[in-house]
Image (cartoon, grey):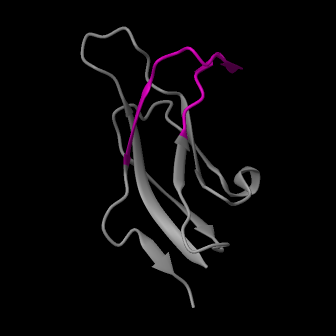
Amino acid sequence: MYTVTFNLSTSKPIGEQERYAETAEVYVDGLDAQNLKKVIHFAGKEGQWITESITFIAKKDKHGFNVFTPGLSNGTATFNLKTYVNILVGQNALKQWP
């Protein structure tokens, strides 16, 4: 069993028309994404780092770490919105449990 800790933020270029991301979904590849994914909500936290973690049981030697940003507009998925999400996975971000 492992826990991976990471930081996310949403940003946008100064003076650009793009919007901040409203949410981001983070999950470990190869595992049940619906039960293990973290949904991060950025409303009121634009430009701030948010620390989250996911605990999982590894099913193979290597797993990918995925970030998906559905473009939401008033709760309706619109996949053509351009948004920015930053992710930081720092040193010692992965912890193995006995």
Q: Eyeballing the image, is 54 above or below 12?
A: below
Q: Eyeballing the image, is 68 above or below 77?
A: below
The residue positioned 43% from the left and 23% from the top of the image is: 20
Residue 13 in which image quadrant: top left
Residue reaching furthest to the front:
61
Residue 61 appears left or right of 9 = right
The residue positioned 39% from the left and 31% from the top of the image is: 46
The residue positioned 66% from the left and 74% from the top of the image is: 57
* Residue 45 pos. (x, y %): 42, 35
Q: Eyeballing the image, is 5 above or below 61?
A: above
The quadrant of the picture occupied by the N terminus is bottom right
Q: Is residue 42 magenta?
A: no
Residue reaching furthest to the bottom:
98
Residue 31 in which image quadrant: bottom right
Viewer-closest of 23 and 89: 89
Residue 35 in which image quadrant: bottom right
**Boundaries of the magenta span:** 68-87
Residue 31 appears left or right of 16 = right
The quadrant of the picture occupied by the C terminus is bottom right
Residue 8 appears left or right of 36 = left
* Residue 17 pos. (x, y %): 37, 8
Q: Is residue 76 magenta?
A: yes
How many numbered marks appear?
Answer: 0
* Residue 27 pos. (x, y %): 60, 52
* Residue 4 pos. (x, y %): 49, 66
Q: Eyeballing the image, is 40 above or below 85?
A: below
